[in-house]
Amino acid sequence: MFKVNYTVKAEADLNNIHDYIALDNPPRAVTYIKELRAVTDNLAIFPYMGSEIGGNPNNRRLVHGNYKIIYKILKSKRKIFIKQIKNCAQKD
């Protein structure tokens, strides 16, 4: 099993996503962030479930709803770093 870690940027992204959704629906903002965290928690068991990006098998993207989760696998250390979470309309 891998350990999932969030970069400062990814934590800020989660806060921004929460705040954006909360403008219209505060309860949904809370549940959506929980969903995103649950998706990333699954990476501890299935680290390669996201699609490869940039020609490097350790750089990956996983989509949940309108958001893509950009992450890096450090296989030798059994760690995953969630680098960024952004709207699918944004480029990687």
Image: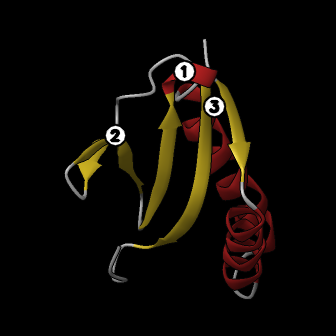
Among all residues in the image, which is located at the extreme bottom? 23
In this view, 41 is above or below 50: above
Secondary structure type for disc 1 = helix
- Residue 5 appears at what percent x and percent y? 72, 41
Among all residues in the image, which is located at the extreme left? 55
Secondary structure type for disc 3 = helix
Three-letter amino acid code of the residue under disc 3: Asp
Reading the image, the residue beneath label 2 is 50
Residue nearest the observer in this picture, 74 or 14: 74
Q: Nearer the viewer, mark 2 or mark 1?
A: 1
What residue is drawn where x is 58% and y is 59%? 83
Three-letter amino acid code of the residue under disc 2: Gly
- Residue 90 appears at what percent x and percent y? 37, 83
Q: Are marks 2 and 3 in contact (CB under 8 Å)?
A: no
Would residue 80 be found to the left or right of residue 68 on screen? right
Q: Label 2 neighbourhood size at 10 Å, few (<14), some (14-19), many (20+)? A: some
Distance between mark 2 and mark 3 Cα atoms = 13 Å
Residue nearest the observer in this picture, 41 or 34: 41
Q: Nearer the viewer, mark 1 or mark 3?
A: 1
Reading the image, the residue beneath label 3 is 41
Would residue 85 be found to the left or right of residue 68 on screen? right
- Residue 15 appears at what percent x and percent y? 78, 72
Q: Label 3 neighbourhood size at 10 Å, few (<14), some (14-19), many (20+)? A: some
Reading the image, the residue beneath label 1 is 76
- Residue 68 appears at what percent x and percent y? 42, 61
Q: Quadrant of the N terminus?
A: top right
Among all residues in the image, which is located at the extreme top? 1
Distance between mark 1 and mark 3 Cα atoms = 19 Å
Upstream in the sequence, badge 2 or badge 1? 2
Upstream in the sequence, badge 2 or badge 3? 3
